[in-house]
Image: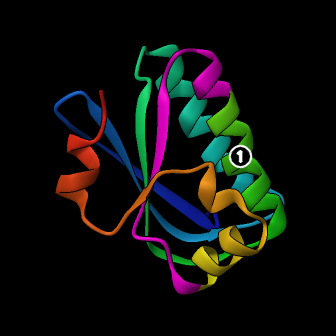
Amino acid sequence: MAELDVRVRHVGIVTILDLSGRVTFGEGSLVLREAIRKLMQEGHKKILLNFSMVDYVDSSGLGEVIANYTTISKEGGQLKLLNLTDRLQGLLVITKLLTVFESFDNEDKAVKSFT
C-alpha cells in the first residue's frame, strides 16, 4: 500500500483530490504527481487538493505540490489547497508560499472560487 492514497471526485467543474497519508519523498510524491498528470491528460485543469487526512508533508512533498502548481498554471489551469494542517500551513508561511497558493478551510467556498 502506498504511503499516500488519492481519491478523486468531481464537484461541478472542479476536481477534488482527497489525500490521505503522507506526502513525502519517494512514493508519496510520485502518487500525487501521477494522479495530477492523469487528470491533466483527461482535460481536468481546475484541481483542489484536500489535505484534511494528510498527517505529514516533507520538503519533497511540498516541492511536488509546487511543481504541480507550476505545470497546471502553465496549462491555463488552477490548483488550490483545502484544509491545510497546522504544520503544512506553518511550512507555507515560513517559505512564503502561502502568498502563492490560494488555500481554504471550507470546501464550498473553495469550489466557488474557481473561474
- Asked which quadrant contains residue 25, the reply is bottom right
Image point (44%, 24%), residue name: 45
Dot 1 falls on a residue whose secondary structure is: helix
Can you say whether 91 is above or below 76 in the image? below
Is residue 27 in view from this perspective? no
- From the viewer's perspective, tell me whether residue 18 is left or right of residue 26: left
Can you say whether 63 is above or below 93 in the image? above
Towards the viewer: 102 or 6:
102
Image point (67%, 68%), residue name: 92
- From the viewer's perspective, tell me whether residue 14 is left or right of residue 28: left
Which part of the image, by quadrant, shows the N terminus?
bottom right
The spot of residue 15 in percent (x, y) is 33, 37
Which stretch appears magenta? 71-86
Read off the residue under disc 1. Answer: 66
Residue type, numbered disc 1: Ile
User: Is residue 72 highlighted in magenta?
Assistant: yes
